Every structure is written in structure tokens, then in C-alpha cells.
Amino acid sequence: MATPRSASTRDAILDAAERLFAEYGPDNTSMRQITSTAQVNLSAVNYHFGSKDTLVQAVFQRRLDALNTERIEILDRLETAATDQRVDPSAIIEAYFGPLVRHACKADAQRRAFMPLQSLTMSDPNGALRALFAAERNVVAQRFTRSLLRSLPTIPEADIVWRFHFMLGATAYAIMRAERSGRAIDQADDEASPRPQDLLDRLIPFLLGGLCAPSPRGVTGNAFEPTIATSTSGTPP
Amino acid sequence: MATPRSASTRDAILDAAERLFAEYGPDNTSMRQITSTAQVNLSAVNYHFGSKDTLVQAVFQRRLDALNTERIEILDRLETAATDQRVDPSAIIEAYFGPLVRHACKADAQRRAFMPLQSLTMSDPNGALRALFAAERNVVAQRFTRSLLRSLPTIPEADIVWRFHFMLGATAYAIMRAERSGRAIDQADDEASPRPQDLLDRLIPFLLGGLCAPSPRGVTGNAFEPTIATSTSGTPP
DNA sequence: GTCTATATCATGATAGAC
DNA sequence: GTCTATCATGATATAGAC
């Protein structure tokens, strides 16, 4: 926000941190690893980001913004293309999870290994990260939840919200498995990463099947509600 | 294996480590925190477990063993109760994921907060843990995969295997969300934890719907195979 | 078996010259 | 803005008395 002069080293730090975080996780990545990988001075990270926590935050934020922008663009196109407002639910799911999977599996330009960010967000013990993302994630999640509601009028809203979380979990886990099989951050071949489309072909039918599953006996009571707020429901954690 | 004398302090360490790991993750838990919580000496953990890594391993192993034993017992009962070998698939899913969810949400005796172990296993950056669990997990996963195959003859085996992983991811994520909302490790009320049955009532239909979803166009080629090996398929990562 | 005391090391952050 | 040098802290692990 304040002093973006010499964006070069700043971005070098972000890129290096992103690679290393993807491989080892933020906790197991030292600032010295980051700065030596980025070939910048150790103090540069404190100068540009203030602290390691702020750097972690910035790394995640950068990718999350790009991801959500792409997701919203796709959904916009889908909704304007549909004559009525009933978009194919499979396309909605693809619009949300497709960019995530593709980003996660992408071999980035010269560097390899990209961050399965939301996967790591899941398991971070630092609550600050989660809180920071909650706001922005809710905006796009609400868009998608509303679109799914219109597309699947027979599914109760509470089920849509719950199952959206379940879908996220299934996808995140699948991404991690796919990423880990890529291994070895230092290898040079940029195209050996697992094909994201193969994973999506397996994943989307599962997600759609789960999303559209019949609700059992009367479990309409919102025992404890997930965190994506639609219009009515609050956020307990 | 070698020297189980004075199991008291050993178990105290395991219990304390389990609580703290669940709250902060193994990486963000120091041995000093563990030993002071367990009210044992710092050196005791090195004496009993050799290193911190071995302790982490032991903590996970203990719970995983109990979990798998329970799962197999339930599945055994289901299969002997069924006249033919076709068990209700919903019951099979419950047999696998029910104990996991219940364990994760359980308020343990005097202590509160239990570990969502497989959830953390997902995100551990240490490959050793994963490798260690792979063998034992495969044994029970194979049992369940075979049972699901008999129960759902129309679903291709490859889909069963893939979707088993997706189910694991959805469950792990849901557990983490439920656990995190429990918060605060030191509070005294043992029964305030989220009801596991409420979560299961939401989760099982989703899992069943995803598992039984129709397979789309011909994606029978095993592009990259998940790690649970049945009879025919290998394990690429 | 258990403890005190300590060795050894890596981390995040900062001070101050340039 | 960038660097060197350093601080203070907390980590795991070990040596050796009891």
C-alpha cells in the first residue's frame, strides 16, 4: 500500500516464497530460504513486508485475488449466456473449482510448482489468515451459492451451503495429492505436472453427485452453520 | 517396542502432545509445551521417543490404530449381517467415516479437544508420516473398497477408488471446520463440542451422492492413479 | 528412569553504514 | 533501498549427577 518502489525485488520475494510455501508450508520455510532463493538480502523481506506473517498474508492474497477474479469472470459469462437464469450446475461447479485446480497444477512460466493455496489455508493454525480470507471468500462464495440456488431449486439452501464446503474439501484434498505427486521443486521439466483436466474429469461428477444428492430425513435444523453466509445465516466460528 | 517401563509418563506425553497437536499442529508445538503440559521433564520425551519426529509419529499411530480397529469391526458386523454380500453402501460409508468424525469430535474423558488426525496428515510437509500411514491405511481402505465394489456393481472400480479419496477430503475438511469452531483448549465444559451426528447427517448423503454419481464420457483411462492400491492398480506417487 | 544444566544451532528481527 | 553484522529468543538434543 505505502511504498511500492522497486517492485522487482518485492515480486522476487513473493515468487520465491510462493514456491517454497507450496513445497514445505509457511511454517517450515525460513526467511533465509526465501531470500536466498530469491537472491535478495535477508533484510529485504522485513523492509518490504514488515514481518514474515505479513509476507505470508501477501503471498496468499495475491493468488486468491487472481483466482476469484477469474472465477467471477467465468460465472458472469455463464449467467449472461443463459437465456433464463438457470445455468447448468455442472458449469457453475466448473467455474469455481476449475480455476482452482488449473492454478494449482499449472507449471508457472520458468518456475515449477504452484501453491495449492486454499488447501494450505485449511490447515493453517494461524487464525489471522483464515479471518482475512473469510471476507473476500464470502463474496464470491455468495455469488456461486446464489447461482446454484437458482440452478437447483429443489435443493434446500442449507444443503447448498453445507455441500459447498464439502466440495471445497474434496477438491483441496485432491489437489494436494496431485501436487505432492509432482514432487521435487528444483527439476527443470515444466510440463510434467499432472493434467488438471484429468483431475477435473474425475472430480466434477463426484461434486455434482454430492451436491444434488437427496436430503435425508428432516435435518433442516441448522445445528451448527458453516461460515459462508448467505442472506439469512450467520457465522458461528 | 523396546523399553515400556513406567508407561505413565509415556502416556502423559502422548496425551499432552495429542491435545497440543490438535490445537496448534505439530510444527507449532514445542517439546517444552508438551512436557510442561504433561508435567514431565523435558528430557523424558527424548528418552521415551528418541526425537520429536518419532513422538509425532507415535501420536498419530496410536489413534490411527484405534480408528482402524473400530472401522474393521463395524464392517465385519455389517458383512456378516447381510445375507448376501451386498451391504447398504450408506452403511459402509458410515462405518468408515463415522468413527473418524466421532473420534474427532469426541470430548475425551477429562481433557477436551481431540485430534482430527487424518486432516492433519493431509497437510503435513513431512513425507515420512504419509509413507508410514500409507501401508496400514491401504489395508483397511482395500477392505472398504472391495465392500463398496460388491455393494455397487455398476460403479467402475477406478471411480470407487478415486471417489474414496474425494470422500476423505470432504470429511477431513468438514472435521477441521467443526473442530476449529470448538476452539479454546483449556475450557472445562466437556460437552459443548459439536454433535458428530449432526455433521454426519449432513455429510453422509453428500458422500453417497458423489460416490454413486454417473461417470461421464469415457474417462476410463487411469491418467494418474490415487494411492490406494486394489488388486490391479499401482501407486504412482 | 528421572532430572538439571547445558551445548549447539536456526530463527525472526533490528541497527546502522553506505 | 540495500547491505553487513548482530541481537535475543526459542528450538532440539545430550551429558552427566542422582
Image (cartoon, coloured by chain):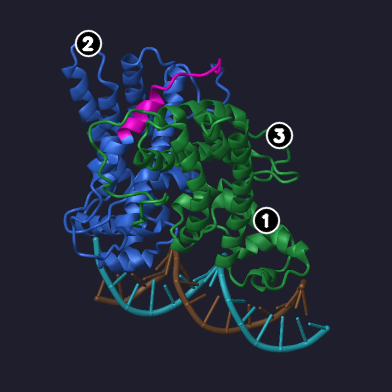
Chain colours: A green, B blue, C cyan, D brown
Query: Which residue: 25% across, 38% down?
Result: A219
Q: Residues within 10 Å of mark 2 (few under 14, many from 20)?
A: few
Residue B139 inside the magenta-drawn segment: no
Is A41 left, or right, of A233 in this rendering?
A: right
Query: Which residue: 43% across, 31% down?
Result: A152
What kind of element bears circle 3? Answer: loop
Q: Chain of mark 3?
A: A
Specify the label residue A157 is tagged with: none
Q: Amino acid at mark 3?
A: Glu
Name the residue that disc number 1 marks: A16
Q: Earlier in the sequence, mark 1 or mark 3?
A: 1
Quadrant for residue B47, please give it. Answer: bottom left
Q: Position of residue A34 (x, y in %)?
A: 65, 60
Q: Looking at the image, do the residues carrying marks 2 and 1 touch, with CB atoms under 8 Å apart?
A: no
Give me the C-alpha separation between circle 1 and circle 3.
Answer: 20 Å
Q: Position of residue A133 (x, y in %)?
A: 51, 57
Q: Chain of mark 1?
A: A
Q: Looking at the image, do the residues carrying marks 2 and 3 touch, with CB atoms under 8 Å apart?
A: no
Q: Amino acid at mark 2?
A: Asp
Specify the label residue B84 is tagged with: 2
Query: Which residue: 23% across, 57% down?
Result: B112
Specify the label residue A191 is tagged with: 3
